[in-house]
Amino acid sequence: MPLDAEQLAAFRRLAAGLDRIDGEAYAAAGRDPLLPILGLGPADAPLCFFGRDPGADEVRHGQPFVGSSGQLLRAELHRHLAPDVPYSFDEGLRVGAGFFWISTVPYKPLHNKAWSPAVRRRFQPLIQHMLSAQWRGGDVITLGNEAFEWFSIGLAGDELALRLHPLPHPSPANARWRPHFPRLLKARLDALLPSA
């Protein structure tokens, strides 16, 4: 479900005040640095994948969860839902279209350093509204500490009744947990999502 004009304007207003948006990455990709990178998805999506923020690949493609970490996630999701079809970038997008994708702050920060808690709090009401107004699901797979902890920094009580399923962030920088990520995600998908 795409953003409406009012939602887009709200994101642009919040982003205009950020001093750590990676303007060079957006310029190199020919993309507007105030346009949020959100996947969203169908309102009846069975799962939401909730991450930290986009990286350079996400900026280049204008799609969330398509960089190295996102490809690891999408490949396992694809293996779960379409095990007989060879995986490719386009197949990952196709299979992923049935899910809801969102992050704490939908803008790439400089040097891929996580946005501060203050910036996450600033965007939280708008992200919370997106979750509650555009998605009817209940199961959220969070990726990494920042995504998981987002749900404890001042949410407006009963607006979100969700079941969180935390996983470590699959970033190449997370050397301890990245090798285990496919197995951990598979266990979550086996429990939450009927396979093909």
Image (cartoon, rainbow, N blue to C red):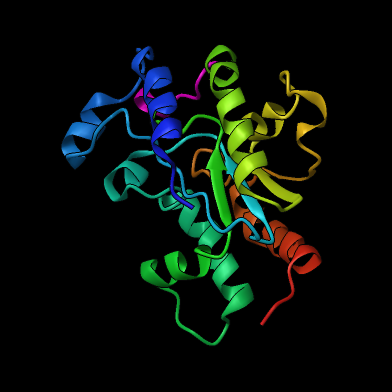
Q: Main secondary structure of the magenta part?
A: loop
Q: Is residue 77 above or below residue 160?
A: below
Quadrant of the snapshot with the C terminus: bottom right
Q: Is residue 27 above or below residue 141?
A: above
Q: Is residue 63 above or below residue 93?
A: above
Residue at 72 percent of width and 29 percent of height:
151
Q: Which residues are magenta?
A: 109-116
Q: Position of residue 149 (x, y in %)?
A: 70, 28
Residue in front for this viewpoint, 143 or 46: 46
The image quarter containing residue 42 is bottom right
Residue at 43 percent of width and 27 percent of height:
11
| Left or right for 151, reference 129 | right
Residue 89 seen in the figure? yes
Residue at 52 percent of width and 43 percent of height:
171
Residue in front for this viewpoint, 113 or 196: 196
Confirm whether the magenta stretch covers residue 18. no
Residue in front for this viewpoint, 173 or 111: 111
| Left or right for 176, reference 191 | left
| Left or right for 100, reference 7 | right
Residue in front for this viewpoint, 135 or 196: 135
Q: Position of residue 105 (x, y in %)?
A: 50, 29
Q: Position of residue 159 (x, y in %)?
A: 76, 32
Report the number of discs: 0
